Structures are given as C-alpha cells and as structure tokens.
Image (cartoon, rainbow, N blue to C red):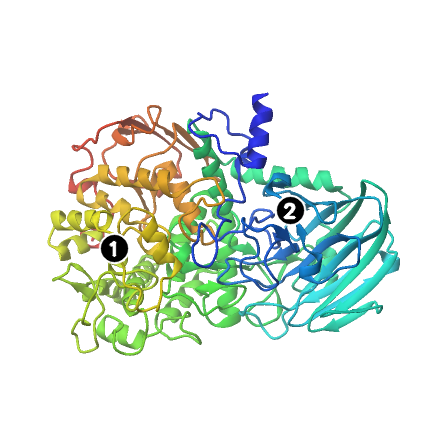
Amino acid sequence: MIIFLLIVFSNLFISVNAQENTNTFSPVDWVNPLMGTDSDHSLSNGNTYPAIAMPWGMNFWTPQTGKMGDGWAYTYDATRIKGFKQTHQPSPWMNDYGQFSIMPVTGSLRFLEEDRQSWFSHKSEIVTPYYYSVYLADHNVTTEITPTERAARFRFTFPKTDSAFVVIDAFDKGSYIKILPKQKMILGYTTKNSGGVPENFKNYFVLAFDKEFEISKTFSGSALSNELEMESDHSGAVIGFKTKKGEIINVRVASSFISYEQAKLNLGEIGNLDFDAIKKKGKNAWNKELSRIKVEGGTEDQSRTFYSCLYRSLLFPRKFFEFDKDGKVVHYSPYNGEVLPGYMYTDTGFWDTFRSLFPFLNLMYPKQLGQMQEGLSNAYKESGWLPEWASPGLRNTMVGNNSASVVAEAYLKSGDAYTYDIENLYQALLHGANNEGPMTAVGRVGVEYYNRLGYVPYDVQINENAARTLEYAYDDFAIYQLGKALNKPKKVIEVYKKRSLNYKNLFDPETKLMRGKNKDGEFMSPFNPFKWGDAFTEGNSWHYSWSVFHDMQGLVDLMGGKDVFISQLDNVFDLPPIFDDSYYGGVIHEIREMQIANMGQYAHGNQPIQHMAYLYNYVGQPWKSQYWVREILDRMYFPTPDGYCGDEDNGQTSAWYVFSAMGFYPVAPATDQYVLGAPLFKKVTLQLENGNNIIINALENNSNNRYIGSLRCNDKLYAKNWLSHSELMKGVILDFNMVAEPNIKRGIKASDFPYSLSTSE
C-alpha cells in the first residue's frame, strides 16, 4: 500500500511534508515536471514547461495552453489546452523553433486554436518526464504521449462518434503540409522560429497513423480546403474518422532538421515497439541517468525536489544531431545551413550555465560533455565564433565571453579522455577574447577598451559595462588555465593572467563595491549600489561585486581584509530589498523575485549572486556558508508548480540545488576545486562514469543539525573548506559529523581556504 501511495503521489504531485524518505528508487517517480510552471512574464517561479522528453533529447513535447508564438507555452494556471506541441524552446524569453502541434477534436470540425481548445484539469493530468496523459473534457478524448530522442508515440482514446478528428498545425511564418491517405501518413515542415537560424531553416515532420482516413482536408490560415497539399504562411491538416467507444488511434511522429527522408529514418527510433514498450523504454532511460545519484534520509519533499532538479539538469543543452542511413552522426548546421558530419548541441546560454550546470556535467557526465565540446568546435568552424547563447544558432542576448569557462573547464577536468579538437577550441577562445563579434553577445564588445584600459568604460555607449569587465576577467583566467594545461608559451598565457586581474580596476574603495568607471579613469557618478542594470546585467552592484570567482583573496585585500569582507557579505542578507528600477523604466521580474524572497539583497532568482553564500569559506567562517546554503535550499526550492524563486534557466538553477544538496559547489569552475557547504541528506551516493563512487555520509543530518562539526575524507580528518575534483574522481568516502551549533574552530586557517589566484602562485 505504501508503494502504491508513493506512485500515486509522484504522479499527482501531492506534497507530503516532513515525512522521512527511505527508498527513493525508481527515482523518475520522484520527478515533478510541473515544478516551475506556475509563472508568467511578471513573476517567475521557474518559467518552465513540462518537457516530455529523453535526457538531452533533440525533440521535446509539451501540452500547449498558450497561443501560437507565446513563449509561455504551458502555464499551470491555464484551464484549456490548444494542442500538443513539439518544442525546442529553452526559455520563454528565447521562445521556440522547430514547432508544430497535434490536437484531437470531436463534434464539429474545428481547427483554429481558439475553437479547438479544450478544458482540462490537473486532476486528470499525469505528468512524468517520459509519459504524459490528459483528459480533454470538451472532446471526451484522452491524449497520451511518450517520446524517444527524435520521435514520439501518441495514443488517442476516442468516444463513439462519426466526427473524430486530428488537427496537425504547422504554425505560421511559412509552413507546408501534405496528406498521403493511402499510406496513412502526413508530411510537412515548419519554419516558425525566433531567430538564430539560416535562411534555409526547416523542421521536417512525418506522422504515421494506424487507421484509415475518412476525411482529409488542409487549411491555410482560417480557410479550410479539400486539397491534400498546402503551402502557405500558416498551413495545417485535418483528418477524420468514425470511432467506437474507447477506440484507440495510434500515431507515430518524428521530425528532422535535415529532410523528410531523415525524418522517416528518425521514425525508426520507434521501430515496431508499441506505446507501452516505448513508455517503458523511456522510463528506463530516465532511471539510468537519475539513479547515478542516490539520495537517502531526506524528507519526501526534499527527495522530490532533488530529482526534479536533477531532471531539469539533464535536458539542456539538447542534441542537435541525427544519424544518417549508415548510422553516422550528422547535423544540420544552425550556423551556415549545411548538413555536416559530427556532433552539435544547442539551446543553452553560457552566462547562466557556466556556473553550475556545466560543472555538474563535468563531474557526472563527462562523456556526454565530450560530445558537447566537439559540437562547440564544429560551431566555431561553421560560424567563425563560439556561441554564448545558442538557440539553435547565434543569439544576441546576455553578456560575457563565458564559452571560455565551458571549454577550459572540460579540458582541465577530463584532459584528452574524449576525442575533440581542443586546439581548435583554444584558438576559438583567443579569437573570441580579442575581437568584437557580429553581434554584441558574441566575442567581446568593448574589447579594445578592455585590453587597453583594463575595463569597459561606462561612458562609451556600451551597456552593462561593469558586468562585462568582471566576466571578461574571469574568462581570461579560464583561458590562462587552459593555456597552461596545453603548455602554451608563457609569454602568451601571461597576458590572460594579467587581464584576469582587471576586476581590480572597478573596485571602489569608498563604497567597497564594484562600480562603473568612465574612460578618463573616474568612477561614474552618481552611484547607487541598489540600481539594477545600467553598469550591471539583471542585477546591481551588491550582486556583481562578488564576481571575482578566481581570486576571492584579491577581493578580500581590496576591501581591506577579512572583517570588512565578512561585513559586506552579511550586508547582502541584512539590507532591506530596496531597488532602483529606473534603468528599465519599471520593475523587471528578477527585481520582484528578490523583493519578495525575504533574504535582503540576496537575489537567488538570477545567476550573478548564486555563488555568494559560499564565500564565507574564503575568510574563515564556513559555518555562515553552511547556514545560508541550507536556508536557500529550504526556502527557495519546492517540488511544486511555484517551486523555483526565479527563472530555472536551462538547468543552471537546478544544478545549484543538486550540488548544494550534495554539500559542495563550483565557485570557480576553471579550477580543480569545489567549495564546501553542507549536505542536505543523510547519505548521497554518486556513481561516476569511471566506475568509482563518491559516498557522502551525514547520518546526524536534520533540520536542526545544519553545521559541520567535523569531516573525515577516507577516514582521515579533513579541515579544508574545499574538495578536489581530481581526488573525488578517484572515489572517496566523506563522513560529515553534522551538529546543531557552528564549529568556529574548523576551516579557519588560511591553508584551509579555497583557491585564489593571488595566493596560489
């Protein structure tokens, strides 16, 4: 009975607070894909949609409650479904591409979105990563979906009617559809996108039904036609049947960015397997990945939150490659429009994901990451640049040159273990670091100023200049680290080491914060550290002043020592959540999320400050990191539709939770170190790809015992405030003695502090 209840609870996502969880497997049963879906443009509780997909799958599926083209494709508070949409959307702000929808209808023939939509209830909705089911009340039809990486099976259960229909909507902005009644098939393409694609971009789709069509019609816009083929701005098809009560119609669907022929090849992922077999295969695929980390001894909500976040950490960047008729890896290039050999991944923004998502993949999925690195090398060959935000090609949003961190970290942590052209990627980093790109989000805008003055000036019409400077400096450190690992000439790499200290040029000794600086060397004025945007990106000076990932000791020295540094850290949590939104002309959602979080100026809903709680480790007060990390875990995450405290952002905010629940975090990804927090669970077991295990024991862990009394590493007392990646990869047992009061004698020596460039060399 207990097992039955757990399954029901995981499917319906009923929260059971404070109940100890002693058996979390099959872990996919703990995932809530609806976590974060109760969002809109003014307040994000995740800005997610339920991605019915395989890990890193090329195609996702989602129920569509929003209008065609609306980035908020599915919102939890919606009451009607307009279709079931193939999607490649990384976030509502980036919107979608490669999209079309399928919708069953009964009664009168209705194909327009507003006409065909149906009321539904979450009470009749089952949502898992590998299976979705919902009852469409207006049509008396149950729709079920189960996916593969590039295909999916649909199962429609119809009532008795002579007016059963399936609508295929290829959307506007240029689409085509063709009905093949004898083959019981429909072919088409959709071109609707949100940018970042070549002129020849298409997503080709094929649908194969198991029932003869009795009605076959196409439409263009709002006009229905008896033609079997339609090419127009907005094309679609409607096929009709007579059905018996409870009759099931099965549909196999696949798509390709290459051709119809390739779409048919992708349909082969289903083969002769029926719906339930694909569903079982999908569940097994998710369990294989999710079970690589086993958590024990937390509450039910903690376990569900952990695996829901782990699920989100395994979706992006998505596969953007296919297998040709000979089984070789090929991809349509979103950069030059050619079909080329090799891997390609997309739909990630490095400004977000360099911080914890890519470090997580380096730790747990380095083989997958090796393919992603090959994809980045291919992107450079095909576009002349590394993408900073790819969806599917180059997109002009956010700041920084953080591909440097992603590329460097992968090689620093895995070396030559995986085959990709690291020399090409190294040259790509040098190119990006010394040139402005074809858009401001590629390469380095303001690079001439940065290289000459040591910062991007405030008064030269380059927005978010201080944020750019701080991120360029860390990116230069990453290039320096990679250059050392590749034995590049010292004269070359010393340039990047020197530039990595450029953060010092923006430190204002009067306010002890980072501040924009004019090209004449004077700080911009007036200065309001609570002003969002302007010199900073989606944050203020209180958030960005800690963006010295690689040299915290250097920042400590600038501030005047440990006591001042600690006081400034404390201020972040102690100050009221006041703000100046004048740069934006109104309150953006990130500001509102900080304001309502009741954590002062700490803004976990956006990336720039997400590492800040760990920084007490650099100044001998690790217990404060242990306190605040637990506060964030407990207060900012829940396995519910409103479960995040801001945009989830393609695995970044989820990977923060996964790392932090395990007890450590990659403050400076281009180093070998993780900075300690404290584990959330009594036991965590990580199965590494190399066959070794990391076992984290914290048997006394509970809501009161949040502090590390002592730590033993392989049964030896361990006093440092960091863990080594290379040592973890050898396999290790970490025994945490968790206590209710801070141990103010542990981790207080300078030799215990994590890496800083200023003290390491």
Q: Earlier in the sequence, mark 2 or mark 1?
A: 2
Q: Decide if residue 73 is on the left or right side of residue 434.
A: right
Badge 1 is on which residue?
A: 546
* Cβ–Cβ under 8 Å for marks 2 and 1: no
Quarter of the figure with residue 85: bottom right
Task: Left or right? Give the position of 490 relative to 308.
Answer: left
Depth order, front residue of 26/504: 26
Q: Which residue is at 22% across, 44% downward? A: 616
- Above or below 102: residue 236: below
Q: Residues within 10 Å of mark 2 (few under 14, many from 20)?
A: some
Q: Nearer the viewer, residue 89 or 239?
A: 239
Rendered residue at 16%/32% (across/down): 745
- CA gap between label 2 and label 1 equals 46 Å
Look at the image and tell me in which quarter the N terminus lies.
Answer: top right
Q: Nearer the viewer, mark 2 or mark 1?
A: 2
Q: Which mark is residue 120?
A: 2
Q: Position of residue 315 (x, y in %)?
A: 53, 50
Q: Residue at x 20, y 53 (%)?
A: 761
Could you tell me which secondary element the residue under label 1 belongs to? loop
